[in-house]
């Protein structure tokens, strides 16, 4: 399998949107927002679980859970949810490798599930995630946390927690690098040198 | 991947990708009430079996259905084949009727390759589910998957394959796949049940089962294929069983971690003693269970991607 590591030098113009420090601060801010919005440290709090969407949503969910524990003292269970088998574009791309799905202990039934992903773009990944999640149980509610919202939605989907809103053109590529999978933490905006070349999201 | 016709010359990276997909599918379905994925909705899979089969046909059918493909079964009896239609015409008919994938079992070695050639233009994928005495690639993949489950890996393991190698497509597919994945394969059989040219295979050949058992990580038994034997390959069933059957005494010669595999159908008391087949060391029902996930993975790699330009 080809390495899915990002950050190698492509023949593209590249700009750093978030540095490693920015990524850490953004995740911390999102953790505070999750605590505030879900009131998960209140006595009658709903049971919150974080489900990361591989590949980069998975480490992001674990980081978010660590900050939530740090700020609120509440350990939030995390899991991963691979949505590949539920995508509507399988026949438009080369074979996608599958990744692991691991449910948090106690499952998702009657939980407040926060889906975590790196970039929100067309919304199709989240559509697939909602379908995939349904197979594993019936959450009380589902929310969405993304590190970057780059616009261009094709479905009526919005995020509850956004690390950074980035206006982009369709031809650009937003790459989130996380040290668990890449050589560093960063968010990059890449513009292909060929202006007609559509970059795949 | 366009077709799956053989494991000969298979790229180990591709094989491992399919096995990883199978593992992820297994995990994705674990503990679910509804074992149904939408992945292959609207794709049509036809199984075309010119030979009898229980597990392979059922396994492919379940694999397709769990991924929401429409699966249609055609058998030689009860179809136009019994009126004299050729393999080629039957296949072209199925492709014209809208089959995206044809899974074929046929008594003639090479049938799946011919079929793939005829269906190239139609863009239909072909999976070889056993062609004569040639290959049965999905069986080898599910055997490798089971070995990975039980032993952790295939690489560096010593796999002893015992019995009717001459008539066995399972043995051929396993030799190619397991050696590609880095295993040491030992074939044990009487000289009459070894194919011509076996010296050229990347394996060790032995006629003494007891000598090979102490170093075996896995013992794979092959069915004695009476239906393909027209002549005296060994004096009697009893004698074969004494020399090459895996009984409890022989099982004790193997290391404690060694796994027993059998592709089925088993002839209890012939190549395998009943107590061995039912022992915890036997992974025979695991093989069947893994077979479904491996075949789902194969269908995923064949059907869930963009159309490739005809090479």
Image (cartoon, rainbow, N blue to C red):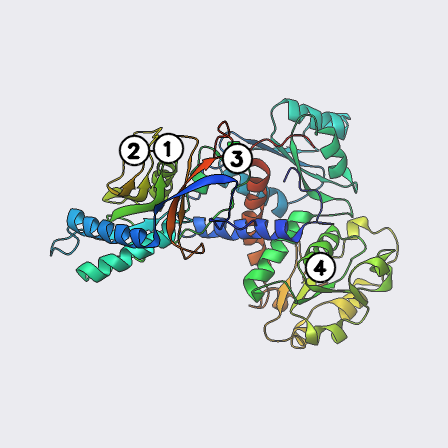
Residue that label 3 marks = A93
Query: What numbered label is drawn on residue A157?
Result: 2
Query: What numbered label is drawn on residue A122?
Result: 1
Quadrant assignment, res B189: bottom right
State whether residue B142 appears in this view. Answer: yes
Residue B91: image location, x then y, percent:
70, 28
For disc 2, the chain is A
Compute the Cα span from label 4 to label 3: 31 Å
For disc 4, the chain is B
Q: Is residue B203 above or below residue B176?
A: below
Compute the Cα span from label 3 to label 2: 23 Å
Q: As drawn, which residue projects farthest toward the left?
A: A43
Residue at 68%, 77% in the rendered image: B253
Compute the Cα span from label 2 to label 1: 9 Å
Compute the Cα span from label 4 to label 1: 44 Å
Q: Nearer the viewer, mark 4 or mark 1?
A: 1
Query: Which secondary structure lies at badge 4?
Result: helix
Residue at 33%, 56% in the rendered image: A62
Q: Which image quarter holds the C terminus of chain B? A: top right
Residue count near mark 2 (Cα–Cα under 10 Å), binned few <14, some 14–19, many ≥20: some
Q: Which image quarter holds the N terminus of chain B? A: top right
């Amino acid at each position: 399998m080809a390495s899915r590591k990002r950050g190698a030098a492509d023949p593209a113009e590249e700009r750093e949107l978030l540095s490693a420090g920015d990524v850490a601060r953004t995740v911390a801010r999102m953790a505070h927002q999750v605590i505030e919005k879900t009131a998960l440290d209140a006595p009658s709090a709903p049971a919150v679980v974080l489900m990361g969407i591989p590949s980069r949503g998975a480490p992001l969910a674990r980081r978010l859970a660590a900050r939530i524990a740090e700020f609120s003292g509440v350990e939030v269970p995390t899991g991963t949810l691979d949505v590949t088998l539920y995508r509507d574009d399988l026949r438009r791309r080369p074979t996608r490798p599958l990744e692991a799905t691991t449910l948090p202990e106690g499952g998702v039934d009657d939980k407040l599930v926060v889906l975590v992903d790196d970039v929100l773009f067309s919304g199709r990944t989240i559509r697939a995630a909602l379908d995939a999640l349904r197979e594993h149980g019936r959450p009380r509610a589902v929310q969405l946390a993304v590190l970057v919202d780059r616009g261009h939605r094709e479905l009526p989907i919005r995020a509850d927690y956004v690390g950074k809103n980035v206006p982009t053109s369709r031809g650009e590529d937003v790459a989130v690098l996380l040290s668990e999978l890449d050589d560093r933490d960063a968010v990059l905006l890449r513009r292909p040198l060929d202006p007609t070349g559509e970059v795949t999201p | 991947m366009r077709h799956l016709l053989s494991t000969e010359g298979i790229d180990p990276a591709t094989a491992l990708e399919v096995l990883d997909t199978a593992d992820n599918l297994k995990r994705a379905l674990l503990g679910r009430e509804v074992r149904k994925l939408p992945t292959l909705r609207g794709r049509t899979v036809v199984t075309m079996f010119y030979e009898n089969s229980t597990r392979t046909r059922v396994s492919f059918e379940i694999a397709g259905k769990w991924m929401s493909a429409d699966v249609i079964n055609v058998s030689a009896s009860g179809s136009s084949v019994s009126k004299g239609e050729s393999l080629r015409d039957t296949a072209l008919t199925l492709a014209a009727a809208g089959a995206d994938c044809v899974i074929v079992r046929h008594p003639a070695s090479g049938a799946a390759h011919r079929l793939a050639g005829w269906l190239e233009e139609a863009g239909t994928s072909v999976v070889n589910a056993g062609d004569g005495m040639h290959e049965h690639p999905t069986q080898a993949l599910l055997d490798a998957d089971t070995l990975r489950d039980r032993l952790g890996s295939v690489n560096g393991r010593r796999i002893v394959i015992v019995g009717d190698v001459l008539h066995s497509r399972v043995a051929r597919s396993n030799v190619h796949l397991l050696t590609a994945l880095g295993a040491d394969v030992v074939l044990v059989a009487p000289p009459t049940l070894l194919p011509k040219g076996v010296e050229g295979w990347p394996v060790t050949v032995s006629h003494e089962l007891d000598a090979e058992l102490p170093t075996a990580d896995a013992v794979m038994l092959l069915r004695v294929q009476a239906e393909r034997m027209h002549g005296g390959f060994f004096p009697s069933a009893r004698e074969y069983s004494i020399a090459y059957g895996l009984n409890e005494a022989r099982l004790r010669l193997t290391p404690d971690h060694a796994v027993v595999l059998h592709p089925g159908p088993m002839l209890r008391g012939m190549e395998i003693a009943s107590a061995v087949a039912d022992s915890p060391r036997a992974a025979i029902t695991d093989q069947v269970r893994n077979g479904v996930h491996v075949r789902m993975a194969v269908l995923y790699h064949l059907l869930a991607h963009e159309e490739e330009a005809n090479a």
